Image (cartoon, grey):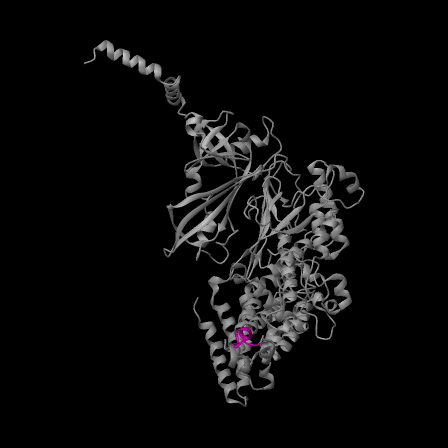
Amino acid sequence: MKTNNELLRWVILLLLLTPAGLLGQNRKDSVAKSADGLTAFKNLIPDSAQTYNGLFRIHRVKSNFYLEVPDSMLSRPFLLVNRISKGAAEGQSETTGYAGDMVAKVEVQFIKGPENKIFLQKLHTLDRSKDSSENGMWRAIDRSAFPPLLMAFDLKSISPAGSGIIDLTAFLLNDNEITGFDMLSRSKLGIKSFFPERSFINRINAYSTNIEIKTVKSYSRLIDLPMTYEFNLSVVMLPQDVMRSRPGDKRIGYFEVIYRDFESNPQRVHVSGRITRWRIEPKPEDIPRYLKGELVEPRKPIVFYIDPATPKKWVCWLIKGVNDWQKAFEKAGFKNAIYALEAPVNDSAWNLEDARHNAIVYKPSEIMNASGPHVSDPRSGEILESHVNWYHNILALLQEWYFVQAAAVDPQARKLPLNDSLMGKLIRFVCAHEVGHTLGLRHNFGASSAYPVDSLRNKKWVMENGHTPSIMDYARFNYVAQPGDGFTQDDLIPGIGVYDEWAIEYGYRWFPPMPESEEDAVMKHWLGEKINADSRLWFGTEETSLDSRCQSEDLGDNPAIAGEYGIRNLKYIMKNLIAWTAGDEGIDNYEELRRMNDGIWKQYNRYLNHAADQIGGGLITYRTRMQKGKVIDFVDRNKQKEALAFLNKELFVTPEWLITPDIFALAGGQVALFRIGSAQGEILNRILSENTFTLLSFSQENAPEKAYDFSELLNDLNKYIWSELSSRKPIDAGRRNLQKRYVERIGALLSAKKEIAAVSFNSDFLSILKAHTKELERKVRAARSGYPDKQSLLHLDDVQERLKRIPEQKN
């Protein structure tokens, strides 16, 4: 048995054999951690950790991911963009859920907080003032607009370089609106539950200006359908050198970043906008040449990559669609400013979701669409990246559009499926349109109204001008051109127009640095001068229903004349529809016949609505005081009457050409008379309304020389729709349906007082309708006694009874 002295000697020996400093270090760590709660760097990030060096340093320790946040990165603006990298099987809605879709975006900064915390704070860019002095306006804004704190991270350690270290693991894996779906995407997909046990962090790539993080997350939809997505979170540092912004203006169509300006007008808050555009600037050494008018290459061009998943035969056409914008940038003084490339292959450092790359992303979807969104810096409007969404079934829509609008003129449109060369040209057109959006351009629905309709049948004129000044309009193909006009395929398909070239010049022409207010004045003056000198540069927004020129799918300055040409072509196509949809040998069904027949009906209805929009139509042309002319005006009375006459000829008089028993026998579908009746009802509801009355009243008050009086409109409708009453001609089935719909529409307006606006209820609107109803009832009563055919007589008895009941209807 050892004595106490022997035990003491063994303890001393054991202490002497312990590695130098080990116990002392542990005691030191324990003391340090108890003092400030932090873990020593080496204990948190061992030598075995995997480290990613880039914009930030990220350390992987087993399944945990730690981020170093140096002081230099605090209060620096970052953009977080979350995209779907792999879409879930059965996990798509109509427009969301596909690979490449952006499902969350937020601008943030890291800030230090108390008690060893680092917060992720959202940037506030809505309110602005340049006065940051001690008593300046910015101080008031700062007190009333404290940005929200989105996330809180505990400080875990301090790196040898002095950077704070936070644990990102829970932030990346949890279900939140930054690293998962935002509320809008969540709603579209019907997300119900999140399953953290089926989720993990997949991969991290670190680059000098961004970090890319892939996560796999599992959810269920409202019907308990399991879904797993792979996301790609891009962490991008916003430019330290904020790009010079350029003012938005209602006279030109750019997307804008909107803010409230508390300084430019000391007596009121001014809501202003700066256009979204890429940073296209000359290289410093090229500035003298640029200012002399020589074309120079930009410091950094816009480059789009084509998704490797895109069918190979379409890649060259997508590239052409991007490159078509080069000539527009040449108007702004830059050559090779934009182009497309095939995506690199077998390159592990390149991925489609990387925020440094712009891409046209191919999506295996039934959606008949394509779109061109972009991501911009909210401080300046600088576009940072774009992913064009290219859905597979856009080809089916292009095929339908081209067939119903161009088959009368282009023999190649008469064989389905369309040949690859023709489809390639259509792809090129749509690609150019969507790339226009990525450059900051909005739809210009007014552009197509700039050209006289008859000019669109002049081959030489169209070759020089195109059939619309802007590819950003929804003016698809030249349906005005007629067989025998001599048009080639290329004459029918739109391209970059004169408005597009001007819009790019406005957005991308580089000017030497000058004060913002001075540059804004220069831009406003320049814009006014250009528009005054060339009416083709007028911009008509897609966001209004008040301007009758701003329509979708239209052509020319007179919808009645253009529609008549269009319907003439539809009649020609309908006569040949069975033969032209036969397709290649081996196609043994009538699917294409049914589909193209439906397409003809849709196109026919477009022509009707274009004309109906003229009745009560307005004209809004934004101008400054330096420009002459009205801002608000109205469609001329004669043009409105011409539109109504067109509707009578092509719709109210039963369009027999649409009644095709031979096609119905093969492809089925709705009964033609029901379809015609539906079109008649839609047009009647549109033009016979309190809204039309109100618009015509505005015209009567403000431009009486142009006004089309509401009573005159009713009289013209009566003359067209009830023309058989004076002649005692038999009323065919289509006309009988039309007349019943007309009576029901009048009855609905007179009986639904609660649905009528007070301005119309207390005006002459109802008085005129009541008088019109009484007069119509008198005419029907007088006509019925002399009607020769039984079916017309039964119909008039019914109509008379309905007219008598109208005053008896209750509110």
* Residue occupying the far bottom of the picture: 788
Quick check: is 129 in the magenta stretch?
no
**Can residue 550 be seen in this snapshot?**
no
Q: Can residue 639 be spotted in the picture?
A: yes
Q: Position of residue 676 (x, y in %)?
A: 54, 75
Verify whether residue 589 appears in magenta. Answer: yes
In the rendering, at what x and y percent does residue 578 appear? Answer: 58, 79
Spot occupied by residue 27 in the image (x, y as percentages of width and height): 37, 19
Q: Is residue 732 above or below residue 251?
A: below
Residue drawn 42% across the image and 29% down it: 44
Main SS of residues in magenta: loop
- The C terminus sits in image quarter: bottom left
Left-right relation of 202 to 240:
left
Instruction: Magenta stretch: give its range.
Output: 585-594
| Residue 37 coordinates in the image, percent (x, y) | 39, 25
Q: Residue furthest right?
A: 292
- Tell me if residue 419 comes above or below residue 217 in the rendering: below
Between 318 and 13, the one lying in front of the other is: 13
Query: Which is nearer the eye, 555 or 237?
Result: 237
- Which of the image's four quarters has the N terminus? top left
Q: Residue furthest left?
A: 1
On screen, residue 341 above or below 160? below
Q: Hey, which quadrant is residue 546 in on the image?
A: bottom right
Q: How many dots with numbers? A: 0
Q: Residue at x 53, y 27 (%)?
A: 71
As drawn, 724 above or below 7: below
Q: Residue furthest front?
A: 1
